[in-house]
Image (cartoon, helix red, strand yellow):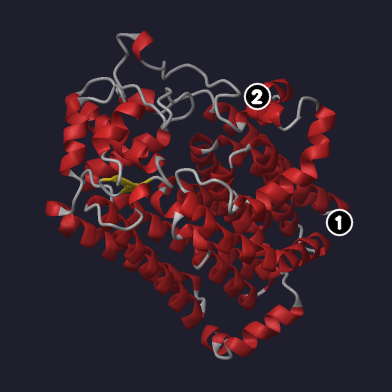
């Protein structure tokens, strides 16, 4: 028997207003939103098609992107309908009103976005925000504001987020194609785009969370803008740098550690350029690094929500939106402070109580980041998403099968004469290590690893073994002719 929204909400959201819950229940089914949902779907389809034409990837790329978009939107509507109408399918995982237990944060974002919309319309202060455990949200809350603005324009309906998510993944796949093609040709771009377009977890676990696709879209945009600044001449380079700073600020507000890892990874490109005595690239890399460090500090010191909310009359009832955010307020912020990291209970359970033990744990942590849940965990006692844990094994099997190609891609990229490839290599290594150490929950790690798996797909496509390229040409003999 499925859990009803009324039994689930008091556990996690005891302070939600009756008005927000009433509006939430009214938005549970399509109703008057059917026309807007259709418009959002068609807008995403048109945007995907236009991006395919702009990328000039040929008929194979367009077919893959549009097919993936159609599959994602169909699955989003199916999952929403099953939960909203409480159909007898996966009832133990249904949260009602279109939400699922494998992505409970989506319901959190929805409920809080409705409250923020009400507050903005009434001109009152933005209320306190809570996570799925019932604890106040201590870190940046910008994504709640983003979702609220989305609802302010379109209306408050849970289906808008997964539909936009499908369009964002189309943009991610096209960016992956463009970056891999820039590194090493059209066929490599197709490999990267196909892997991103049809990777299983983007259809289920990340399909309900717009934040995942948005962060990866911003990350790949940062890679593309850095490449433009790295190579273009003055005016175009300056324009790319300005855009990169803006993208990095938004990225740092949504998931600050991704921006920080990207900034650290630029050192890899600078090191490669220095080894090849490319003075201009070294200078540009140092400029970008200095600016992005400043962006990181700025993003951790301000809260854009404070610009939209009146001064708070009772600080005790809510988080002071104007105060600087402290290191450690996010579960990955502790990676910045070794003392805080080693004091965490979940880290101590792993025996990581010293720097020496953390270094010794790195190989195991990277293996977890790549392959968690590990095969012996698939049949362990199920939790809220026990059935989907077995489905996650399908993706792990695919990942294991791709591991030799991913490893070859990393090695070939490190040996490449293209200094840009070192940015991807450094980012993948740092991100996999940080996530493997700091994230101890397999379900969270399963989603977050897309933040370094997608760049690995780009390297696989760009620097894949010759045999894989030959196989692609045999399977898609018209790909090159269509592209040309």
Question: Which residue corresponds to the image point at 69% horizontal and 85% vertical from the top-left?
Answer: 470
Residue 222 visible in image = no
**Residue 161 appears in the rendering:** yes
> Considering the numbered disc 1 on the image, is that residue within a helix, a strand or a loop?
loop
Displayed quadrant of residue 150: top left
- Residue marked by disc 1: 276
Q: As rendered, which of 131 and 170 lies closer to the eye?
A: 131
How crowded pointer 2 is (Cα within 10 Å; few <14, some 14-19, many 20+) is rated as some
Residue at image point 57% right, 87% down: 476
What residue appears at the point 41 percent right and 15 percent down from the top-left corner? 320
Residue 143 x %, y %: 40, 38
Count the marks: how many?
2
Picture coordinates of residue 144 (x, y %)?
37, 35
Coordinates of residue 88 in the picture (x, y in percent): 28, 57
Residue ID for mark 2: 344
Please tell me in which quadrant of the rendered image residue 408 appears. bottom right
Foreground residue among 154 and 358: 358
Residue 237 spot, x, y in % from top left:
60, 52
């Amino acid at each position: 028997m499925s859990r009803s929204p009324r039994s689930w909400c008091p556990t996690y959201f005891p302070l939600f207003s009756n008005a927000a819950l009433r509006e939430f229940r009214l938005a549970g089914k399509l109703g008057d939103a059917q026309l807007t949902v259709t418009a959002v779907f068609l807008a995403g389809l048109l945007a995907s098609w236009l991006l395919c034409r702009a990328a000039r990837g040929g008929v194979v790329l367009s077919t893959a992107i549009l097919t993936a978009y159609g599959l994602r939107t169909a699955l989003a509507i199916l999952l929403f309908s099953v939960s909203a109408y409480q159909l007898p399918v996966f009832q133990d995982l249904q949260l009602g009103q279109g939400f699922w237990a494998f992505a409970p944060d989506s319901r959190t974002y929805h409920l809080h976005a409705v409250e923020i919309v009400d507050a903005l319309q009434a001109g009152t202060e933005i209320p306190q925000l809570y996570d799925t455990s019932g604890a106040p949200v201590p870190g940046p809350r910008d994504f709640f504001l983003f979702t609220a603005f989305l609802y302010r324009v379109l209306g408050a309906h849970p289906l808008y987020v997964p539909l936009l998510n499908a369009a964002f993944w189309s943009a991610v796949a096209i960016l992956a194609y463009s970056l891999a093609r820039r590194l090493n040709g059209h066929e490599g771009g197709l490999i990267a785009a196909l892997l991103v377009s049809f990777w299983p977890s983007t259809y289920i676990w990340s399909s309900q969370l717009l934040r995942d696709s948005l962060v990866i879209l911003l990350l790949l945009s940062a890679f593309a803008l850095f490449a433009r600044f790295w190579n273009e001449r003055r005016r175009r380079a300056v324009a790319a740098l300005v855009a990169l700073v803006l993208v990095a600020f938004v990225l740092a507000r949504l998931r600050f550690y991704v921006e920080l890892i990207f900034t650290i990874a630029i050192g890899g490109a600078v090191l490669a350029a220095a080894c090849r005595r490319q003075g201009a690239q070294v200078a540009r890399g140092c400029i970008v690094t200095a600016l992005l460090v400043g962006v990181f500090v700025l993003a951790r010191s301000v809260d854009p929500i404070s610009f939209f909310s009146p001064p708070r009359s009772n600080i005790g009832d809510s988080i002071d939106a104007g105060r600087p955010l402290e290191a450690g307020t996010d579960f990955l912020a502790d990676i910045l402070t070794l003392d805080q990291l080693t004091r965490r209970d979940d880290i101590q359970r792993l025996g990581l109580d010293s720097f020496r033990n953390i270094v010794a744990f790195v190989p195991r942590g990277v293996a977890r980041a790549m392959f968690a849940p590990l095969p012996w965990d698939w049949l362990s006692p199920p939790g809220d998403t026990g059935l989907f844990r077995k489905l996650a094994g399908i993706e792990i099997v695919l990942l294991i099968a791709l591991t030799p190609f991913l490893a070859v891609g990393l090695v070939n990229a490190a040996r490449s004469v293209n200094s840009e490839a070192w940015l991807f290599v450094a980012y993948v290594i740092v991100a996999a290590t940080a996530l493997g150490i700091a994230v101890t929950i397999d379900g969270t790690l399963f989603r977050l690893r897309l933040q370094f798996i997608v760049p690995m797909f780009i390297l696989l496509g760009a620097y894949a073994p010759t045999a894989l390229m030959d196989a692609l040409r045999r399977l898609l003999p018209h790909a090159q002719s269509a592209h040309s």
